[in-house]
Every structure is written in structure tokens, then in C-alpha cells.
Amino acid sequence: MQTPVPHIVEVAIPLPLEGSFHYLVPARLSPQVASGKRVLVPFGRRKVTGYLLGDADAPGAGELKEVLDVLDEEPLFTASELDFYRWIAGYYLHPLGEVIKMALPAGINLVSRYRCEQGEDGTPVLKEFLAGGRNVRTERYFLPVADEERRPRGKGLEILEYLLEMGECPAADLRKRFGNCTPQLNRLVQLGCARVEAREVYRDPFRSQEYQHDGPLPLNPAQSEALTRLTAAIEARAFSPFLLHGVTGSGKTEVYLQTIAVALAAGRSALVMVPEIALTPQLVGRFKRRFDCGIAVLHSGLSDGERYDEWRRIRRGEASIVIGARSALFAPLTEVGVIVVDEEHEGSYKQSEGVRYNARDLALVRGKLAGAVVILGSATPLVTSYHAAMNGKLGYLQLPDRVRELPMPQTEMLDARRQKGEVFLPPLIEAMGENLDNGGQTLLFLNRRGFATYLVCESCGHVLRCPNCEVTLTFHRLKGKHVCHYCDFSMLPPKNCPHCGDGEITLLGRGTERVEEQVQQLFPHARVSRMDRDTTRGKGGHARVLKELEEGEVDILIGTQMIAKGHDFPGVTLVGVLSADASLNLPDFRSAERTFQLVTQVMGRAGRGDKPGRVLVQTLAPEHYALARAVSHDFQGFYQEEIAFREEVGYPPFAHLASLTLSAVAASQGEHSADEAAALLQKIKRECRLRVEVLGPVTAPLGKVRGRFRWQILLKGRERADLHRLLFHFRGGFSHPSTVRLTIDVDPVDML
């Protein structure tokens, strides 16, 4: 008798472990096994969720453990999506199982847990149970039937009359209207006066909003030319990446909308990515007014249930357009025709924890795999993107003017040197008063939050710092505490200096709370609001503040970076930049680029309506080329100076980077591991003859965060292949104590 061939499958486990694992499939489960499904498997002493990658040939089948269960009726990911996940895992040097877990909606995985229960004899018993998993939410609907002879009384009669009027109603709505009415509802069903059925209900974060349909807007010649080229690319059904470089207010979103309409007409879908969830409500509104097809939204501001429901809608083909932040990149769309990366220059497209991917870069990879058009849009594109466009690697589309022939805002630089730390210089105060009198709205930009930046003792000069991180504490007046923005450590204000025991503790610097207080003192009758992470926490926080501004309920809005990004408010006629140079002196080669981008973007919020805009920029560095070029709306001039600097020092686009960060609670242990890592990198570089610079180790700019001391090693290579080869060999040969953490960041964006 022939021995049956064992059914062996390859499984990825979502744990920080290299490689995949093999399991035997018992005969009872074999018909259910398919690539893309989840399986419950034994792993060590636990049971965990794994992802089926496909069948495998493996020796020693008798030593393999068996799959315990298949958890899905249908696959969660397709073969093409698995190819995408494998690409990410290989490029960013991260375990495939964790990449897949990140790409799928949260809360669906099962893992074994243990709890203590009382046994039959009364003794404690440790029992295993499965935790996690997300069930489909159902909601009961009650439907009236034709038989009106059997009529209930009291509350039951009221409910029946309401059902006859409404036709049908969710059970939750009936309980909200009539209170606890479960007995009456059950009685109606028993009498045959009503029928109950279970329906699956999606949790829609925008369900309560109504949108009035509108049509395409007329395009100016530059917009028309861009649309013509994008339409031709969609019709070619081949990967076509473009940089859409348009000044603030030039109508990039209208180009997106009309391009997507072309893709939808061709039977294809669209993915639209934005850098911040604060941009999502306004953009969703524009899309819902324009398109009748299903539109799904994915971002971290949704609950796990809402994200899961949106994911299911997309998977089932009920949404043709997906809008969202970084994680929307993994939306399970099919037949993708257009991918839009709006504000492509934003650093928030880079994931800073776990799988350190860059959604902006991966949009190009996904577009290539799907044969789609990819549009990178920005008024201040990355130096690397513009360089690629000028060298033919990206198609270049330019929108040099604002729509409706609106002028760019009038700009003025205010020299804040020798002004004794004044928050507002006299010209800005005067401009704010005039704007209030004329009924205009004002935006004040400050790249900090809190009431004051730091505390210092006037007697000994001691600065109050976080005990866990090498950063100063920020005072939040409403909380009445000093807070660390890195580890959330907080403390009450000290009465005396903790270093010398006496002296006055003085608040120095400025934060959004302090600016808000001073604005209210200067203009007591103005309606003042603030937009930062403190005021927008909680669901709908961003939308609430922006709606107030849009509806004219705010005269002066004070905000951090989130007010600079892509918002369109016609009522804003004055923008004040209070500390334009705050980011110029960061230890990062991109500091000038980020300053230029930030100032240009916040300036672009002014004058987008019928009234002209004005911008006043306060700075301690008026001669710096990043600020001078931003104030004069001169991207070309900035690019020429910045690209010369990049080429001289050998930074992107003239090199590829990877950073290694090692951290430990004990400084000596972390430093020793960092030295060993650098020595191994140098050894591999020599033996493999790789053209890669190994810089460091050095103490990280933020040398201590959350109680851990940090060291950095920077790798620079002209050829991407050399860089990856070095890292591949390093990962296989470097060992370190479990108390030392190693993070590898390919194409780092944040050098701190």
C-alpha cells in the first residue's frame, strides 16, 4: 500500500523572528487550506495565529507539528498582495509575518492566553483560552407584517404603530426611542405582528454626514495639460509615475478628481493617500460630493471595528475609492488604476515603529506591481523627487499658478533679532488688528505645543529635564504640569530649583498655550482657538476645529504643523509665522529642506478665497536661503542651493542611507554593543568589497529616550545593492544581549 504524501504548508508567524515555518496539515483540514488564510498553530508553549503562504516541501515531516485549525473561509490576501508583502519584508529587512500582520486590520488574530479558574474540587485551575479576533457586528431589524388583527397594548402598540410608519427600524434605534423594550419586541414577534432578521451593518465613520453632489470644475491650461497626460497614461494601462508640482492653491485636488474619474470609467479603482488624518474629513467631503461609487476611509483615527468594516467593504469590492493616511497603502483594492500621494514631501508617510516603511515610496512599488498611474503631488516636493523628475525617472507636471488667477499672498520677513524674545513683533500685531477689523481670519503658526518650552533656574541656570529622556519638559497650563513629549513623564511645577534649592524658576520659550493666552490679552473680543495634539485628541477632534474655522466661528487660529498641511479655507487672509527658524538648527541634513517646505506650506493657507492674502514671517535668521527663498516663492532657487549642498556632502539623492540605532538601560552595555556592531560592519565591508561608508557609532542626538541610552551608526552607499548586501550579512552575523535593542531603518527620514 502506497504511503500518502504528507501535506506540508509554509506559515509566517507575526513575531520578530526570521524566516517562515513548516507545519503538517491533518486530513480533516486539508480541503480548507489555501494561501492567504489564517491558521491556528502551536508555537512553543503557545497557540498563535499564522498566515498560510502556500504548500511546501520539507524533509523530516514526522517531526513537524500539526495545524490546529483554519480560521478563515476566504483568503485574507491574494497572491499579488503576498508578492507586495515579500518585497516590503526584503527591502526593509523585517520578518514577513509582522509585515502581513501590519497590513491586515487590527484585532483579527487569535493567540492563546491563560486564566485562573476554580476547579470542581474548589482548587485553582489554570485554563487555556483563545483571545483576540473580531466578530462581524450584526444588528437586528424589526419588520411589520400585514396581519393587523392581533394588536398589542401599551408600549407594544406604540412600537407597532412606529414600525408601520417607518417600515423597518434597527433594534438599537427602537431601544433608544422607547427605552428598555425587549419584552415588547419579543411579544410582537410571537404574535406575528413583526418579523426580526439579522443583518450585517458596517460601522461608517461618515454615515451621519450628508453631501450635495457637484460636478467637475473648469480647468486652466496647465491643469488641462496635466489631465491629458494622466489620461493617456491610464489608457496605456502601464506603470507611469508622475510628480505633480503645483503651487499652493493651484488646483491639484481637482486634477486628482478628474483623473480618478477617468480610471473609474475604465473599470479601475483608486487609492488616495494624505499625510495626516486632519486632512481626511475635508478631502472625503470633496470626493463624496463628486462620486456616487463606494468610498472607504482608512486611518488610525478610526476604531478597530470601523477599520475592520472598511477593510471588508474594500475586500468585497463595495468601494472603488480608498482615502486614508499611511496605512491606506495596504487597502485590498483590485484593479488599481491610480494611486495619489498628496503632499508627497511629508515625513509622516514614514512609519517610525515596527516595520519602518515609507508609504510614499511603497506607493511607487505598488503602482509598479499593479501597472497603475502614481501621482506624487506637492507644492514643495522633496529634493529627491524633483531631482528624479528632472532626470526623467518621474514624469513632470507643473501647475505654476493659482486657480481663478488668484495672486500668491503678499509676504514680508520680520527680523526678530534684538527684540528681547517678543512673541509678536509690532507689524504682526498691527496686521492682526487690521485683519480682525476687516472680517478676515488669521492663522498663527508655531511649531511647538504647550505653554512654555522649558524651565530654567535664574540663580544657577539649571534646566528642568525629563529623567527618562535627554529633553526639556514642557509646561502645559491647563494640565498644570510639566510634560515630556517623548515618554509622557509629567510632574507638578517645583517650588524651588531641584539643583540649588533656591532661586526663581522661570518659564522660557513659547508654546501654543502661551501664544493663545497672549492673543486673548491683545484682542479680548476675538474668537481664538488652538489646533495642536492637545486640543485634537479624541475622535473627531481635527474635524471639529477645522469645521469651526470653515464656518467662520473662529477669528484667530493658533496651531502647530497640522494647520500647514493642505487645508483650504477661503476666509483666511492673514498668516503669521512666529518662529520660522525653529527647525533650521536640528542635527539633520534635511533641516533646510523641511524649513522651506513648512514655511511655504503655511504661507499657502493665505489668500485662497476672493480676498488677497498676506503673510508675515518672524525669524532670527532672515539671511538663510531656506527662508529667503520661501518668502519669495522661489522653489527653483532653493532647489539649486540645496542640491549643490547635497552633492558636496554625499547625501540623497546622491547616496542611499540606512541607520542603525542600539539602545540599552545600561550606558556601558549599549556603547559596547554599538562598538561591536560598527566593527562587524567594517569587517563585512572589507571582505565583500562594498562601497559603503560606515559612520559611527556616535551618541544619538536624543541620547536618552524612555530611560534607554541610544547610539547611532549611519551607512551611506552610492549603490542601493551594496547597502542591502552589507545589512543582510550583518543581520546574519551580529548577536547582542537581550537587554540591547537594535533597530535598522532603511531610508531613514528622522535622524534624531
Image (spheres, rainbow, N blue to C red):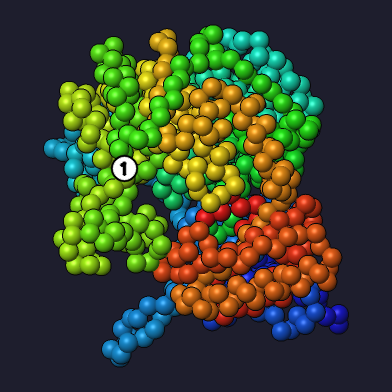
Q: Position of residue 410 (x, y in %)?
A: 45, 16
Taking the image as shown, residue 488 lies to the left or right of residue 15, namely left
Q: Residue furthest front?
A: 418
Taking the image as shown, residue 503 lies to the left or right of residue 443, namely left
Q: Is residue 17 visible?
A: yes
Q: Position of residue 673 (x, y in %)?
A: 59, 76
Q: Residue furthest left?
A: 154
Which quadrant does the N terminus fall into? bottom right
Camera-side residue of 180 and 414: 414
Residue name at image x 46 percent, y 46 percent: 300
Q: Position of residue 517 (x, y in %)?
A: 22, 36
Camera-side residue of 178 and 248: 248
Residue name at image x 53 percent, y 51 percent: 587
The amino acid type of the residue labelled 1 equals Gly
Helix or strand or loop: what does disc 1 sit on?
loop
**Does residue 19 lie above or below 283 as drawn?**
below
10 Å crowding of disc 1: few (<14), some (14-19), many (20+): many
Q: Position of residue 99 (x, y in %)?
A: 61, 58
Image quarter of residue 513: top left
Image quarter of residue 395: top right
Residue name at image x 59 percent, y 24 percent: 634
**Does residue 72 lie above or below 350 as drawn?**
below
Camera-side residue of 329 and 358: 358
Q: Is residue 23 visible?
A: no
Q: Which residue is mark 1?
A: 511
Q: How many numbered discs sit on the rendered protein?
A: 1
Residue name at image x 50 percent, y 11 percent: 406
